[in-house]
Image: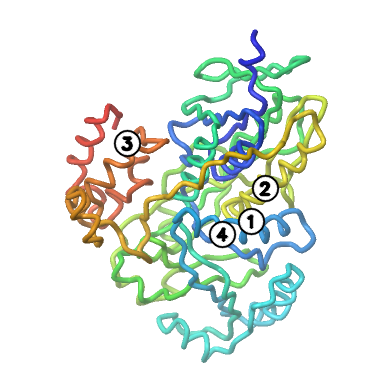
Amino acid sequence: MSTHDVIDVVVVGGGIVGCAIARQLAGTSLSVTLVEARDDVGDGTSKANTALLHTGFDATPDTLESRLVARGYRLLGQYAEQTGIPVERTGALLVAWTDEERDALPALKHKAARNEYHACEIVDAGEVYRRVPDLGPGALAGMTVPGESIICTWTTNLALATDAVLRGARLHRDARVKDVRVGAEHTTLLTTRGEVHARWVVNAAGLGADHLDNAFGYRRFTVTPRRGELLVFDKLARPMAPCIVLAVPSSRGKGVLVSPTIYGNVMVGPTSEDLDDRTATGTSEEGFEFLLAKGRALMPTLFDEEITASYAGLRAAVDRSDYLIEADADQRYVLVGGIRSTGLSSGMAIAEYVEELLAGTDLDLTPRPDLPPPPSMPNIGEATARPFQDGDRIAADPDYGRIVCFCERVTAGEIRDTFQSPIPPTDLDGLRRRTRVMNGRCQGFYCGAHTRRLLESHGQRQ
């Protein structure tokens, strides 16, 4: 085998964390390959979450997670400005509904301070209702978290992956790792698309991280798929949620939130249900009833509005209280496990941390002097102008004025652009995550057939 066939680092897992690591390492002299089991990046845990850019105010102090979430919050905020990832700085409000929750607020504020977040303020019931008038009756007090924000998790994942590819990383999609062979000089990953040879392997496989860890001879953790279901309300409901409304963590858990979305909707959730099936992303009648009951207590008038969609995601829960990020120099292997939902905010900081772990190895981490600029991502958020609102853009290219999806105001030009991008979609779900097409009130009833024809015209499957 030629030495040119052996990649310096292979990153397994194309979610936000894996893509951030691939991007970070592709900024050095290393050759990097990103291997993703699914047909698209961001098609697993990363695509279905509460999409919050999290300050880390409530993390357990003095943990690796708390440090990386705080650092990642700053890094991703800056990166979003550079690339156009949609972010809205809405702030959050924790609402106390019981004496136990009200009495917990001072300790939560102190915890935030220990995490170097000092902007929280405890407010009385009057201020709670001034900030969120549509809350149900019975709120006793609250605590503000001004830095909490909403973000587009789809665009975040795609931006990091695109940046990695532009920096020279190779992307293998639909390449599930079936087996691992650790040799004296390199490791061979047997995937559904053939063999990949690596000097080092980084395991950022999310729901499958424990299985890959086992292949390297470890038995240090087990992933439990934890399903979270959410309800999405019509855009007419958006004024009811001017900020993120969080429950105060109590002896019963973190509770249900009400949050605006970057796309102009309102969502309620999530549930929290441990499962055995790592593919069970379907919604359930029990989850729907739970969210209806909890949501109506939080904001009764919200449930007079239309629910346009429901969805579920699986979080990779583990029996550890902190991130599990360790390097094995003998096997040239790095585990990035136990990341949970905070990986959206901490992903870029995790990537930095992995690079630090690799700095003492035989890898050449010299920064590349010729890095391309960060990609400019298409805007699919509501906070700034969309293509259909840009007269100059439409004048230059009429396709940006041709609406395909009227619910979400997605144009033919935006759909065309996805197929000309470094990582084009391979199916309708991928196209939806890049443009919002078929994501609105009618859920594709009006535009579905036309969208399928556009997809087929570019040789992609439905």
If you read the primary sequence from the N terminus, does the residue marked by circle 3 or circle 4 appear first?
4
Residue 350, numbered circle: 2
Amino acid tagged 3: Phe
At which x and y percent is residue 129? 47, 86
Residue under label 4: 78
Q: CA distance from mark 3 to mark 2?
A: 30 Å
| Label 4 packing within 10 angstroms: few (<14), some (14-19), many (20+) | few
Asked if the residues shown at circle 2 and circle 1 are in contact, with their CB atoms under 8 angstroms apart, the answer is: yes
If you read the primary sequence from the N terminus, does the residue marked by circle 2 or circle 1 appear first?
1
Vertical relation: 388 (above or below) 282: below
Mark 1 lies on a secondary structure that is helix
Residue under label 3: 419
- Picture quadrant where residue 221 is located: top right
Asked if the residues shown at circle 1 and circle 3 are in contact, with their CB atoms under 8 angstroms apart, the answer is: no
Mark 3 lies on a secondary structure that is helix
Q: Nearer the viewer, residue 356 or 448?
A: 356
